[in-house]
Amino acid sequence: MIRLFLVDDHTVLRHGLRALFQQEATMQVVGEAEDGEQLLAQLPTTPCDVVLLDLHMPGLDGLATTIRLHAEYPDVRVLVLSMVDNERAIGQALAAGASGYVLKNAGHDEIIVGVQAVAAGRRFLCSELGLSMLDKVLVSTPELPAKPTSGLSAREQEILRLVADGLTTAQIADKLFTSPRTVETHRQNIMEKTGAKNTAALVKTAVSKGWLA
């Protein structure tokens, strides 16, 4: 059972999240707080595994709270749930000790996957953030000589290389800061585009045609 503590100054949002997690048999909301000070006051008597918190709150904000949690409760994982999607805020949160970052407009499935990931000790970024950061990396990367084309998108080619390296769906999701469900969708698209019947056949085709060069 994953014990969750919700920290956000918007009561309606906390109630919505509580209702979402009540549908999950492996998750339990053990407490709620409007800011970091309330959270830290309750933690000694209300232990939890994951704190889901906003960055911008009155009193002790999300960043300062994350720093305190990382220092005083190192076993508690922090998953930031915020509307802020700029790289600086994400970088500060992760540097402060957060294990993951999810936008408030993410789907319910991604929030659930994010909680499961950080509870298991992995890092997590929702798919919108992961794709946005990948796009910026691709824009800043010098153009490379043309390779034999596979008809796959840049994301699909990246996942194909990781599959060829022997990574599982969960490991690929962790590496690309996205959800296993998103990776599995890409894998299915790759199989359909290449006509491969299984992973072994897919890798063999990719190697023979030079797609992994």
Image (cartoon, rainbow, N blue to C red):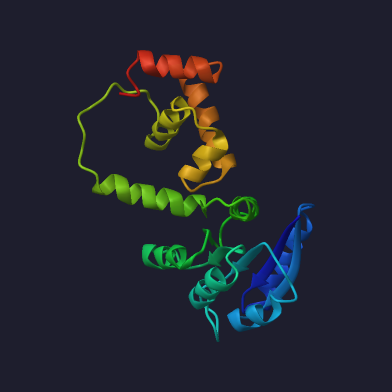
Along the line of sight, the residue nearer the viewer: 108 or 71 = 71
Along the line of sight, the residue nearer the viewer: 56 or 124 = 124
Along the line of sight, the residue nearer the viewer: 195 or 63 = 63
Q: Quadrant of the C terminus?
A: top left
* Residue 149 against residue 28 in the figure, above or below: above
Question: Residue at position x 46%, y 43% from top?
Answer: 175
Residue 169: x %, y % from top left = 55, 35
* Residue 108 against residue 168 in the figure, above or below: below
Residue 21: x %, y % from top left = 73, 59
Question: Residue at position x 24%, y 49% from top?
Answer: 140
- The answer to whether one can see residue 195 in this image is no
Question: Residue at position x 51%, y 45% from top?
Answer: 174
- The answer to whether one can see residue 137 in this image is yes
Q: Quadrant of the N terminus?
A: bottom right
Whether residue 126 sits left or right of residue 144 in the image: it is right
Residue 196: x %, y % from top left = 51, 16
Residue 186: x %, y % from top left = 51, 34
* The furthest residue to the bottom: 59
